[in-house]
Image (tube, grey):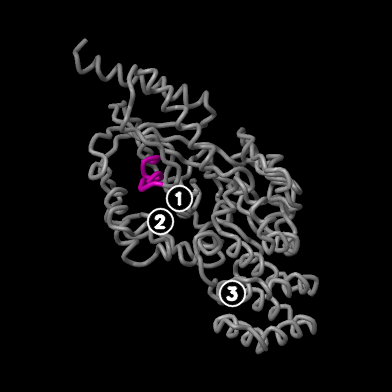
Amino acid sequence: MTGAATSSSARRGLTDRIRDEAERLGFEAVGCTSVRHSDHAAFYRAWIEAGRHGEMAYLARPDAIEARTDPASRWPELRSAIVVALRYYGDGDAHGDGNSFGGGDGNGDGPGESSGNGDGYDARDPSRAIIARYARGRDYHKVLKQKLLALLAWLEQEVGHALPAARAYVDTGPVLERELARRAGLGWFGRNTMLLHPRRGSYFFLGALLTELDLEPDEPFERDHCGTCNACVEACPTGALLGRDATGAPVIDATRCISYLTIEHRGPIPRALRPLIGNRVFGCDICQEVCPFTRKSSAPAREPSFAARGTNEPAFGVQLEPGAARPHPGTRSPSLIALLETALDPSAWDAFTRGSALRRAGRAGLARNVCVGLGNWGSPEAVPVLTSALADPDPLVRGHAAWALGRISSPSAVSALEQQAGHEPDPWVSEEISAALAS
C-alpha cells in the first residue's frame, strides 16, 4: 500500500470516528469538507450590494465578507470543517427556526391545510401568538456550542494533541454554514434558501467545527430535489422569496422576511407589511411548513432542550434566582394579550426570555411584534392591554400599539388614541396616532 493510500485511509478512519462520536453526542447528521474559498462569493457580494440584508450590518462588514467568502484570509492554518445538524422539531412531537434565520438557522402542516400545525394548537386562532418552532425552547446557540466543544475535546484526545486553531461556530461567526453543509453532503439549497435534506427536511440547526486537521472530505450534495415545486415562494405572505437567479441560486429579500422583521429589524415594521405578518410574533415557519420534504419528515426531536415551554416554565436547564420568576403564558401558542402583558413588564420579560432565543428581539421588539399581532386580530378584548402599551417608555412600542388600536377602531380604542394624542412627545408616534385615528 502506498504512503498516499495509507494517509487517505487514516484520514477516512478518523473521519468515521468523528462521525460516530458526533452521533453519540446527539447530532443526527455530520459531514466533513475542506476549508476553502466559497463557491458563492460573487452571489453573496451581489446580495449585499443589492441591500437584501437590510439592517444586518454584521453581514456587510468588509472583514466579515472576506472571512465568509475566503476563510483562509483570516485562518490560513485551518484545513477542514466538521458540519453537524441537530433536529429541533418533528411532526407529532409532543414538545411542539440554524438552519435558522439569524440563522437559523419545517414539517408542520401548511397554512390552510389543516386546523393544526402538528404540535397541539390551532395556528389559525388569531388571538394566540405563533413563535417559530426553533425558539420555543432553550437558545440553540448554547445547546449546539456546548456539544461542539465536547466534540472538540474528544477530538484533541483522539489525535493526542491540542488543536489551538480550532473554533466552533453556531450561527454567530463569519462562516457560511449552509454552504459548508452542502459541500459536506448534508443537503441542497431549497427555494426557501434553507438547507434541505430529502429525509430530514429543514427543521434542524447547523453547527461547524473548523480545525487544522486534514480530514477526508465527504461527497458534496449535488442534486437539487426541488424540481418545479414553487410552494414556498407562493406561500410567503410578504413576497420575500424571489425564486432562483440565473445561476440557480435561491434569492431572499431579508427586508421583507417575517423572521427578519420580527427579530433582526430594530425599527418600525413598515405599515404595508404589518397586516401580512398575522399573529407570527417571533420568526416564521411558513416556507418550511409548505415544503413537501419537510412536511414528510416525521422523526421527533430528541434533544429535550428544544421542548416548547408551558405556562410559567423556564427554559430547559435555566435556574432563575429566588423571586425572579414571573407568570408568563409559555411558548406553545401563548395568548397575545398575556404575551404583551409579559413584554410590558421588564422584570417579567427578563425572566421569560432568560436562556431563550426570544431575547434576540429585545423587550421593545417583542412587544412591537405582539402589538402587530393584536392589531391583526382586531378584537376589542385587546384594547386594555394596548392602552397600557401606549404608556410604554419606548416609542417603538407606543407607535405599534397606536396602529393596533386603529385597526380595532372600537369607541374605547379611539378614546385611548385621542387621549394619547394630546401629550405624545415623539413625532413618529404622533404620526402613527394620527394615521390610526384617520383610518
Question: Bounds of the magenta span?
Answer: 173-182
Q: Main secondary structure of the magenta part?
A: helix
The reply to whether callout 3 and callout 2 are in contact (CB within 8 Å) is: no
Q: Earlier in the sequence, mark 3 or mark 1?
A: 1
Residue at position x 64%, y 37% in the image: 317
Q: Which residue is mark 2?
A: 250
Sequence-first disc among 2 and 1: 1
- Relative to 242, say whether 275 is above or below: below
Could you tell me the amino acid type at mark 3? Pro
Seen in the image, is 205 located left or right of residue 123? left
What residue is pinned by disc 3? 395
Residue 176 belongs to the span the image colors magenta: yes
Q: Position of residue 189 (x, y in %)?
A: 42, 48
Q: What residue would you read off at disc 1? A: 190
Q: Are marks 2 and 1 in contact (CB under 8 Å)?
A: yes
- In this rendering, position of residue 361 left or right of residue 59: right
